[in-house]
Image (cartoon, helix red, strand yellow):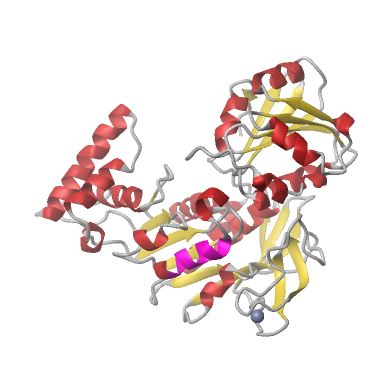
Amino acid sequence: MRKFLAILVCKLGRAVGKLIGKGSSMPGQFALKICPDILSRMQLPAHIIAVTGSNGKTSTVEMIAAILRADGKHVVYNEEGSNQIEGVTTMVLTHSTFSGKMKADVLLIESDERYAARSFRFFHPTEFVITNLYRDQLTRNGHPEWVYNAILPAIHSDTELLLNADDPLSSCLAQNHDKVKWFGVNECSISSKTPSGVYHDGAYCPICKAPMEYDYVHYNHIGAYRCTKCGHQKPETDYTVTSVDLDKGELVLDGNVSIQLAFRSIYNVYNILAAYAACRECGVDSAVAAGVINNFILKNGRMQKFTLGQHHGILLTSKHENSIAYDTNLRYVKETKEPCTVIVIVDAVSRKYFTSETSWLWDIDFSQLDCSHVQKVLLCGRYANDLAVRFGFTCISNEKLALHPDINEACESLKNNGSEDLYVVTCFSDRDKLLSNVQKEAQ
Ligand SMILES: [Zn+2]
């Protein structure tokens, strides 16, 4: 009876919530009050895929959903991004019959890494993709090792882990776990010999703390690591990017699956690889997966194109407080060769909570913008002065820098001047302030 009531309340709550434009957490919250173990009483689909990690969750989940749907599977996933237990409960209950049977072939869950253990207390994923673990949202998450410890209790012995072989930290989740499949990128055109960035979180082994050595890296400390003492090293991969040409936008998986990249970023490469691995594990043919991934445009608008006056621009959205995401976006700008202006906006540090904590700006390798085709860098938003102090410690000459705390004013001045390409590096909440001033282009 409690189960029926919880499902009923959740369905009603969701219907009302949709009408009044409320989020998707509240109905689940009510259902959990009525029946705290409701998730263990549901009849769930045969495949439950979860995706967590510091970066790439939403993009990977979007791609997995598109591939599985192309394969004819009925997929339910948290499209609105509510990734804690309340949101997951809403999603499961609203897609179920009143007797508690979920109407789907696959339940796909983007899970908040900190709260995964709570979400998976009453059921567990059949496949669990962990994209990576690194510095992210300092105020909320502390350090990556702390997040690692928060994920551990979410892992059930029956769950098959799909892990990033190139990440020295999240790869440790394979310790004492039998069912593991690995994805990784071979040494190729994008690799370098030594870790990059202004700090090196992969300098010491996460298991025994001895110094680590690297055969190659693809970005920051992500690549082929080897502990000098305990043997922790990049494992053999089951799903592999065997070659990448970011200039041509070409990618080859497992030596024979060719992909054209809609967005030529190393980030995109890893998200594609993780999605490919998850779908192959669910029995999808490689040709079906490749067909969907080819020129796949993400719906989440992380790379929105726009025009402003005579300028063509690209919004490179990442999360604030996530230096590696910033670094890869700056690398994208560095590798374009046309003259351009870069706009860095930090107006609200987080859209979830208020913090004026800006120490993470010092973790970002802004010196990547010290190249001849970057003609100007506009520092915008409430924290423009913090950015200016940070940029004062790069080699970028002062003449290239301009301070515009007011985003609208910055857009106005660009609109009437010049026609060079624009790249905007910012987070989701701040990008909306820019988008209100520009003309969005269809993807
Ligand atoms: Zn070690």
Query: Residue 286: horizontal and vertical position, in percent?
Result: 56, 64
Q: Is residue 440 visible?
A: yes
Residue drawn at (69%, 85%) of the image: 229
In this view, the residue in front, 13 or 46, is: 13
Q: Is residue 72 visible?
A: no
In this view, the residue in front, 94 or 318, is: 318
Q: Is residue 430 left or right of residue 6?
A: right
Residue drawn at (30%, 27%) of the image: 20
Furthest residue in direction left, as rendered:
1
In this view, the residue in front, 55 or 197, is: 197
Residue 426 in the magenta stretch? The answer is: no
Q: Is residue 174 left or right of residue 380?
A: left
Query: Residue 16: horizontal and vertical position, in percent?
Result: 24, 32
Residue 339 sits in quarter: top right
Query: Residue 126: horizontal and vertical position, in percent?
Result: 39, 68
Residue drawn at (63%, 78%) of the image: 235
Residue 194 sits in quarter: bottom right
Query: Residue 205: horizontal and vertical position, in percent?
Result: 66, 75
Q: Which stretch appears magenta?
A: 144-152
Residue drawn at (61%, 34%) of the image: 443
Q: Quadrant of the N terminus?
A: bottom left
